[in-house]
Image (spheres, rainbow, N blue to C red):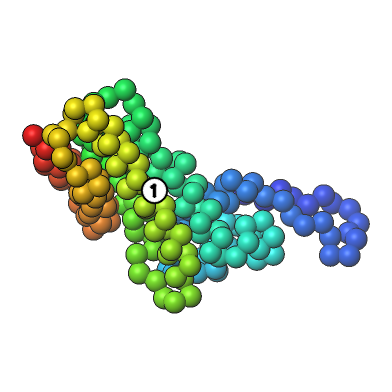
Amino acid sequence: MNDMKKEDEGPRRGRGRPRTFDQNEALDRAMRVFWERGYEGASLDVLLTEMQISPSSLYSVFGDKEALFLAAIDRYLSGPGGYFEPILRADLSAREAFRQLGEAVAVELTTEGRPAGCMLSLALNHASPAAEPAQAEVQKRRTGSLQAFQTRLDRALVGGELPAGTDTLELARFYLTVFQGMSVQARDGASRESLLATAAAAARAWPA
C-alpha cells in the first residue's frame, strides 16, 4: 500500500515539487504507533517509516512529535476511543448507561486487529521531563472523561436514579478507575470474557 502520490514526471525546478500524501491515513498510522509503543517508545524513525513520509513533511504538516502525538490522541478519541460519549448521551437510565459502558470497554479493548488497551490510558502514564507538557495535555483529556461521567451521574442524582447524598464525583472516579484498570489488564493479555466479568462486577456496585 502506497500513500505517496508519484511526482509528475518531467523536468524539475530546483529540488522539485514536494510529494503529497493522505494526511488522515498518515495520522492513523501515527496513532497506531503511539497506541502500541507509547509516546516515548515511539521514535521519530519508526513514526516516519510507518507514516511513509519525510521528516520535512512531518514538521510542515503536523509540527513536532508532541503536536503529532496530541493530534493522534484526538484522532483516537474521535475514532476507536470515541464510544463513551454516545452511550452517555443515549436515552438510557444512568445505571444502564454505565453497564453498557463497561461492556463496551471490554469489547473495544480486545478488538482483534487493534493494539490492546486504551490509548488514552496507556500512551503516556510516566514521562521524562521533556515529555511532561504532552503528559499534561493527556491528563486534561482524561479529566474530560471524568467530567463527562460526573455530568451524567449528576443528572441521575437530580432525577432520583441515585440515593440522595450520593457523591457523584467519587462514583465517577470509581467507574473511571475500573475502566482504566481494565485497559491495563487488556494490555497484559486479559481475555474479553475476563474483562466482561469485571464490567459486570462494577455494574453490581451501583449504589442501592
Q: Is residue 20 visible?
A: yes
Question: Can you name the residue that lies furthest to the bottom here?
Answer: 129
Numbered disc total: 1
- Quadrant for residue 202, please give it: top left
Residue 200's spot in the image, x, y percent? 14, 38
Report whether 76 appears left or right of 99: right
Report whether 117 appears left or right of 185: right
Residue 2's spot in the image, x, y percent? 62, 49
Residue drawn 56% across and 60% down? 67
- Quadrant for residue 106, please give it: top left
Report whether 67 appears left or right of 195: right
Classify 10 Å Cα crowding around label 1: few (below 14), some (14-19), many (20 and above): few
- Quadrant for residue 34, please give it: bottom left
Question: Can you name the residue that lies furthest to the left here?
Answer: 208
Most foreground residue, 54 or 206 = 206
Residue drawn 16% across and 41% down? 166
Residue tagged by mark 1? 144
Residue 12's spot in the image, x, y percent? 88, 59
**Location of the C terminus (image quadrant):** top left
Determine whether the residue tagged by mark 1 lies in a helix, strand or loop: helix
Residue 5's spot in the image, x, y percent? 71, 48
